[in-house]
Image: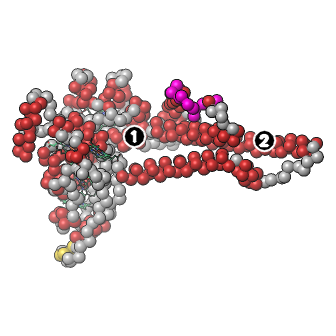
C-alpha cells in the first residue's frame, strides 16, 4: 500500500476520535438538521475535498526527488560521487537500521555527540564537516528522500537490445494506481450514470404524467437540463463555486509565497556568470568580489569595474558563447575592446537578487563573517561548485534562531568584544556560551 492511502486512513481516524461536533470524513455523521439540498451539497463538498486530499498527499509525500534537490543536493549527490558529504547511492544498505536515519537527518551533531559509533566514524572520514540539521523534515519525507537517493539518479540508459531501462528516479509508487486517473475514471462513471438515470427518470415521470393526464416532461437538451438543475440547486452550485475559489486562492498564495523566500531559487542573470569557474576552478576569493561581507552589513555584488580587473585581458574562453557574455561586461563598463580604451559610456549591470530577506529583518554580514567566523559555505552552500548561485538555506526565522541557539561564540581574537566576553565568562563559567546567551534571540537584534 502506498503512503497516500495509509495517511488518509490515519487522518480519518484521528479526525473521528477528536470530532465533538461534526466530522467531514464521515458522511454518516452529517448533522441531522440538514435538509435535502444541504445534504446533497455536503456529499458533493465531501467528494471534492476528499479528491483534493488524495491529490495533495500524492504530491506532498511521494516526492523524495524534489525534497532531495531542495535540502540535500548542495552537499550530496544521488550517485556514488562525493561532494561535501558522501554520495548517497546505496546509502540504505550501509547505514545502521531502524531510527538511525531520522535521528541523523534531524540532528547529526547530537547523534555524533551521543557516541554513536557509525555517526562518529563518518564524521571523522569527512574531516569533521558538519551536516545541516533538518528538524522540520518528517519521517515520511526522509524515507522518500533516502529511497530516491539510494537508487541513484543516473539517466535512463539504453541496453544492448535497444530497450530502455526504467528511470530509477521515478517516484517509487508508480507501480500502484495514480489517484488522479482513478479520480477521473470515477468521475466519468458517475457522469454516465447520471445521464442514464436522468433519461430513466424522465421516462418514468412521463408514464406517471400520462396516467394522471398531465403534459409530458419537456424534452430538454443536456445543457438545458444542466442549467435547469443549477436554477433549482443554487446552494450546491454556490458550494462548488466556493470550492474552486478557495483552491484558486490557495494556489495563488503558494505561488506568491514561493517567489520570496525559497531554497534553490536562482533567477536569470544579465551575464551567465559562473561561480564554479571563478571561485572554484580559478580559486578567486569570495571577498575579492564580495568585499562588503567583511566590512559591512551587505556582502554586495561586484560592479563591472571589478570584472574588468581581469577581463581586460580575458575576452574569450574555450567555452562556446563566452565571447558574447564577456562582451556584455565591456558594454557595461564602457570599454571598447578594439581601441582598448574606455568610452566613458557605462551601463551598470542589473544583477537579480537571489537572497531576499524581508525589509524588517536586520542581517549583518560582517558580524557573522569577521566576528562570528562563520564560513560563507555554512549559509550559502558550496558556491564554488555552483554554475548559477542558488539559495541554499531556508532564510526563515527558525533557521537564524536555530543557529544562534547552537553556535558557540568565538572568544579568541575578538578584540571588539573582549569586555562583553569577559562578562559572559563570569556569568556562565565553564558552560558553552552560545550566540543566544549573548542576546542573539532578542527580537530587536534582528528586527528594526
Ligand atoms: C551542509 C552539507 C550537507 C547537507 C545540506 C546535507 N548533508 Fe548529509 N552529510 C553531510 C556530510 C559532511 C556527511 C558526512 C558525515 C559528517 O561529516 O557529518 C553527511 C552524511 C550523511 C548521511 C550518512 C551517509 C553515509 O554514507 O554514511 C546521510 C544518510 C545523510 N547525510 C543524509 C542527508 C540528507 C537526507 C540530507 C537532506 C535532507 C542531507 N544529508 C543534507 C553533509 C550534508
Ligand atoms: C569574480 C567575482 C566573484 C567571486 C570570486 C565570487 N562571487 Fe559571488 N557573485 C558574483 C556576482 C557577479 C554575483 C551576482 C550574479 C549571480 O547571482 O550569479 C554573485 C552572487 C553571489 C551570491 C548571491 C547573491 C544574491 O543575489 O543573493 C552569493 C550568495 C555569492 N555570490 C556567494 C559567493 C561566495 C560564497 C563566493 C566564494 C566561494 C563567491 N560568491 C565568489 C561574483 C563573484
Ligand atoms: C580575478 C580575475 C577575474 C575576475 C575579477 C572576473 N573574472 Fe571572469 N573569468 C576569469 C577567468 C580566469 C575565467 C576563465 C578563463 C578560461 O577558462 O579561459 C573567466 C571567465 C569568465 C566568463 C566566461 C565563462 C565561460 O563560460 O567560459 C565570463 C562570462 C566571466 N568570466 C564573467 C565575469 C564577470 C561578470 C565578472 C565580474 C562580476 C568576472 N568575470 C570577474 C577571471 C576573472
Ligand atoms: C550566517 C549566514 C551567512 C554567512 C556566514 C554569509 N552569508 Fe551571505 N547572506 C546571508 C543572508 C541571510 C543573506 C540575505 C541578506 C538580505 O537579503 O538582506 C545573504 C546575502 C548575500 C549576498 C547578496 C547580497 C547582499 O549582501 O545582500 C551575497 C553576495 C553574499 N551573501 C555573499 C556572502 C559571502 C561572500 C560570504 C562569506 C564571506 C557570506 N555571504 C557569508 C547569510 C550569510
Ligand atoms: C550558521 C549560524 C548562523 C546563522 C544561520 C545566523 N547567524 Fe546570526 N550570528 C551567528 C553568530 C556566530 C553570531 C555571533 C557573532 C559574535 O560573536 O558576535 C551571530 C550574530 C548575529 C547578530 C548580532 C547579535 C549581537 O548580539 O550583536 C545578528 C543581528 C544576527 N546574528 C542576525 C541573524 C539573522 C537575521 C539571521 C538569519 C537571517 C542569522 N543571524 C543567521 C551565527 C548565525
Ligand atoms: C536571529 C534573528 C531573529 C530573531 C532573534 C527574531 N527574528 Fe523574527 N524573523 C527573522 C527573520 C529572518 C524573519 C523572516 C522570515 C521569513 O520571511 O520567513 C523573521 C520574521 C518575523 C515575523 C514575520 C513572520 C512571517 O512569517 O513573516 C515576525 C512576526 C517576527 N519575526 C517576530 C519576532 C519576534 C516577536 C521575535 C522575538 C521573540 C523575533 N522575531 C526574533 C529573524 C529573527
The numbered mark at residue 67 is 1
Secondary structure mostly seen in magenta is loop
Q: Which mark is residue 326?
A: none
Q: Tell me residue 100's x, y (percent).
A: 33, 25
Q: Residue at x 18, y 75 (%)?
A: 342
Q: Position of residue 415 (x, y in %)?
A: 5, 44
Q: Mark 2 highlights which residue? A: 197
Residue 282 is situated, as x and y percent measured from the top left of the image, at 19, 53
User: Residue 100 lies in magenta, yes or no?
Assistant: no
Asked whether mark 1 and ligand 1 are closer than 8 Å, the reply comes as: yes
Residue 163 appears left or right of 307: right
Residue projecting furthest to the front? 33
- Label 2 Cα crowd, 10 Å radius (few <14 / some 14-19 / many 20+): few
Q: Residue at x 17, y 75 (%)?
A: 341
What residue is at 66 percent from the left and 36 percent from the top? Answer: 34
Q: How is the image coloured?
A: secondary structure
Magenta range is 17-28
**Ligand 3 positioned in quadrant:** bottom left
Amino acid at each position: 500500500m502506498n503512503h497516500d492511502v495509509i495517511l488518509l486512513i490515519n487522518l480519518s481516524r484521528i479526525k473521528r476520535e477528536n470530532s465533538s461536533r461534526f466530522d467531514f470524513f464521515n458522511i454518516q455523521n452529517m448533522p441531522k438538521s440538514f435538509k435535502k439540498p444541504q445534504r446533497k451539497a455536503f456529499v458533493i463538498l465531501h467528494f471534492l475535498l476528499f479528491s483534493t486530499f488524495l491529490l495533495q498527499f500524492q504530491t506532498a509525500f511521494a516526492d523524495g526527488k524534489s525534497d532531495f534537490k531542495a535540502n540535500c543536493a548542495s552537499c550530496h549527490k544521488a550517485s556514488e560521487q562525493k561532494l561535501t558529504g558522501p554520495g548517497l547511492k546505496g546509502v540504505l544498505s550501509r547505514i545502521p537500521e531502524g531510527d538511525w536515519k531520522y535521528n541523523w537527518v534531524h540532528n547529526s551533531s547530537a547523534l555524533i555527540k551521543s557516541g554513536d559509533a557509525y555517526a562518529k566514524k563518518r564524521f571523522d572520514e569527512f574531516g569533521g564537516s558538519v551536516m545541516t540539521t533538518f528538524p522540520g523534515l518528517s519521517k515520511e519525507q526522509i524515507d522518500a528522500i533516502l529511497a530516491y537517493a539510494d537508487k541513484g539518479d543516473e539517466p535512463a540508459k539504453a541496453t544492448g537490445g535497444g530497450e530502455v531501462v526504467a528511470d530509477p528516479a521515478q517516484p517509487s509508487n508508480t507501480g500502484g494506481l495514480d489517484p488522479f486517473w482513478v479520480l477521473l475514471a470515477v468521475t466519468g462513471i458517475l457522469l454516465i450514470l447520471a445521464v442514464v438515470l436522468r433519461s430513466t427518470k424522465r421516462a418514468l415521470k412521463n408514464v406517471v404524467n400520462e396516467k394522471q393526464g398531465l403534459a409530458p416532461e419537456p424534452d430538454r437538451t443536456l445543457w438545458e437540463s444542466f442549467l435547469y438543475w443549477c436554477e433549482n440547486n443554487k446552494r450546491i452550485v454556490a458550494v462548488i463555486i466556493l470550492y474552486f475559489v478557495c483552491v484558486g486562492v490557495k494556489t495563488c498564495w503558494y505561488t506568491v509565497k514561493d517567489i520570496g523566500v525559497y531554497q534553490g531559487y536562482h533567477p536569470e542573470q544579465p551575464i551567465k556568470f559562473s561561480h564554479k569557474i571563478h571561485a572554484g576552478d580559478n580559486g578567486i576569493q569570495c571577498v575579492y568580489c564580495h568585499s562588503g561581507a567583511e566590512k559591512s552589513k551587505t556582502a554586495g555584488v561586484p560592479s563591472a569595474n571589478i570584472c574588468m580587473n581581469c577581463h581586460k585581458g580575458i575576452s574569450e574562453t574555450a567555452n562556446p558563447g563566452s565571447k558574447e557574455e564577456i562582451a556584455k561586461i565591456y558594454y557595461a563598463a564602457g570599454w571598447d575592446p578594439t581601441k582598448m580604451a574606455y568610452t566613458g559610456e557605462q551601463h551598470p549591470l542589473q544583477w537579480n537578487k537571489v537572497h531576499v530577506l524581508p525589509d524588517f529583518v536586520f542581517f549583518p554580514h560582517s558580524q557573522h563573517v569577521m566576528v562570528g567566523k562563520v564560513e560563507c559555505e555554512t549559509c550559502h552552500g558550496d558556491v564554488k561548485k555552483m554554475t548559477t548561485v542558488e539559495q541554499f538555506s531556508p532564510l526563515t526565522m527558525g533557521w537564524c534562531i536555530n543557529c544562534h541557539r547552537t553556535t558557540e561564540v568565538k572568544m579568541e581574537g575578538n578584540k571588539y568584544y573582549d569586555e562583553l566576553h569577559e562578562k559572559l565568562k563570569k556569568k556562565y563559567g565553564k558552560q558553552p556560551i552560545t550566540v543566544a546567551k549573548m542576546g542573539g534571540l532578542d527580537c530587536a537584534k534582528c528586527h528594526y
